[in-house]
Every structure is written in C-alpha cells, then in structure tokens.
Amino acid sequence: MARTISVIYDEIIAEKQNMSELTALVPNPDSAQKLLTDLTSTSKVAVWRLWAWVMAVAIWIHEKLWDEFKAEVDAIVAAAIPGTARWYREIAFLWQTSGALMWVDNKYQYNLVNPSLRVITRASAEDVSGIVHIKVAKDVDGDPVPLDTDEKNAFIAYMNQMKFAGVFLDITSNEADTVTVTATVNYDPQVITSTGARVDGTSGAPVVDAINEFCKNLEWNGRMYRQKFIDAIQQVEGVIDVTVTTIQVNKSGSAPTTLTDRYYQTDSGYIKLSSSSTFTYQVD
C-alpha cells in the first residue's frame, strides 16, 4: 500500500540526517509538517527541501501506480477458473433456474445474470478418487429441501457445461437423512409438563424444538456428533438430565442403523429428526 507523501518526505529527511556531509543543510532537523508550515510563512524555503518534497511526490505517484497494478492483477486472478472443488461449489450457487449458458470471452456464462433465479442455498463439493461429488439443496421456509426433478436435471446440465473436460461429476440432491431417538428426559415440573410441553405454553415440545434447531444448524455435508446431539437436549430449560437409549440414523431410502460411533457423517448433506422418535418424560 502506498505511503503518504509526508511519510516519504520524513524518511528522506531521516536518511539525510544520517549523512554527515549534509549536516550543513538547514533547518536541522526537518519534517514534512515543518516544511508545510514554512511554505505558508514569509521565511525563505531552502531549495534542497523543495527537491526533497518533489522527490517524495514522485515516489508517492510511483507507489500509487503499483497499488493500481496490483489491484488489476488481483482482479484477473480472482476471475480465473481454477477448477478446484471449492470452485465447483461456488459455481453451483450461481446456477439460475432459467436461461441457457452462452459461450462468451472463452467461458460459459449467462447472457443475463439474475440473482433472483438462483435457488441453491446449500452446496458442497468433494474430490474423491477423480470424481467430484456435489451435493446441493434449496430452502423452503428456511429449511433445506432437495431440488425437484426438473430443477435437478437443469442443474446437472449446467454443471456439465461448466465443468473441466475429463472431470466426472456425481451430483445429488436428496431428501434429508433422518435420526430416530429413544430417550428418557428427567425434567423440572416447574418448567416442563409430563407430556414434554413448557408449563408457560410457549412450546409444545421444547426438546424436539431443540433437536430440530440443532439439526438445522449443522454444517452442510458435515457430521452429527453423538455427544453434541445429547448436549443440545440437556441445554433445554427445565431438562435436568437425559438418558439416550438409542440413536438410529439412516440415509434417504435405506433402513436405519444404530449409531455406535462418535459421529454420523451425513450422506445427503443434512439431517432431520424422525417423527418416530420416542421421548419419555419423568420428574427428576
């Protein structure tokens, strides 16, 4: 970043102070502020000071030009197509539900960019053994849902045009994985009722609400950790303790399996609580 003219001038003067053969040049010491003050007074201004100031201005202009050149190079680099997994994720967000891609300036792009036609809000891309696995979803009322058939077909066509030659894509947009829980909740009867609702009536199922919020806030295509899942229940106001008997997870369209590891790696990219979950409430 370019230095100011005053900073450059002061550095020139500081260097002059280190040269004994220039000690006769007065005033001594000097600074940019002192020069500017002298310029507005009736006193004489040494020619050497003006030359120092001219040189400072010249150096400042030179540094400003380098700043502009760097900004131009950065813009070119930012516009480059790297073909990384992260790049595939970013272009997924740029897909529009209508409009064909055009070949312009040696790349595919929309003739008319319309952000209101971009519906993908969740996306991930992973390069595994030469295949780029892409998972996407859109939002409905703030919750992720899969693309419908027509949307998915259009998105696949878009990605196949945008991808690098020779790259294999595996694109999915599936229903959420599900988690089925069997648990006993020990509660404070001043806060929670025997049916699991809040006594003050603000929630009919605060434990279920907490789990839904936990699932909603999981990182896309991330892991659901068993202990963090349990912690989310225990943080509910009025919950004294919770004993989780089983946690079953399943991919879309497959049979549930019991979670025995520390975490479950989401398959569709996200997870939701199954309505088959069972919570037994008892006073602590």
Image (spheres, rainbow, N blue to C red):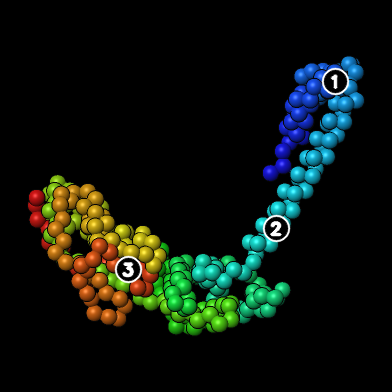
**Residue 20 locus on image (x, y percent):** 80, 22
Front in this rendered view, residue 206 or 10? 10
Q: Which residue is mark 3?
A: 265
Q: Residue at x 27, y 64 (%)?
A: 263
Front in this rendered view, residue 255 or 278? 255
- For the residue labelled by badge 1, is the local secondary structure a helix, a strand or a loop? loop
Q: Answer with mark 3 or mark 2, whichever residue precedes in sequence.
A: 2
Quadrant, the N terminus: top right
Q: Which residue is mark 2?
A: 73
What amino acid is found at the position of numbered circle 3 in the picture? Gln
For the residues labelled 3 and 2, the Cα–Cα distance comes to: 40 Å
Q: Are marks 1 and 2 in contact (CB under 8 Å)?
A: no
Give the number of the mark in front: 1 or 2.
1
What amino acid is found at the position of numbered circle 1 in the picture? Leu
Is residue 133 something one can see in this rendering? no
Q: Which residue is mark 1?
A: 25
- For the residue labelled by badge 3, is the local secondary structure a helix, a strand or a loop? strand
- 138 above or below 42? below
For the residues labelled 1 and 3, the Cα–Cα distance comes to: 74 Å
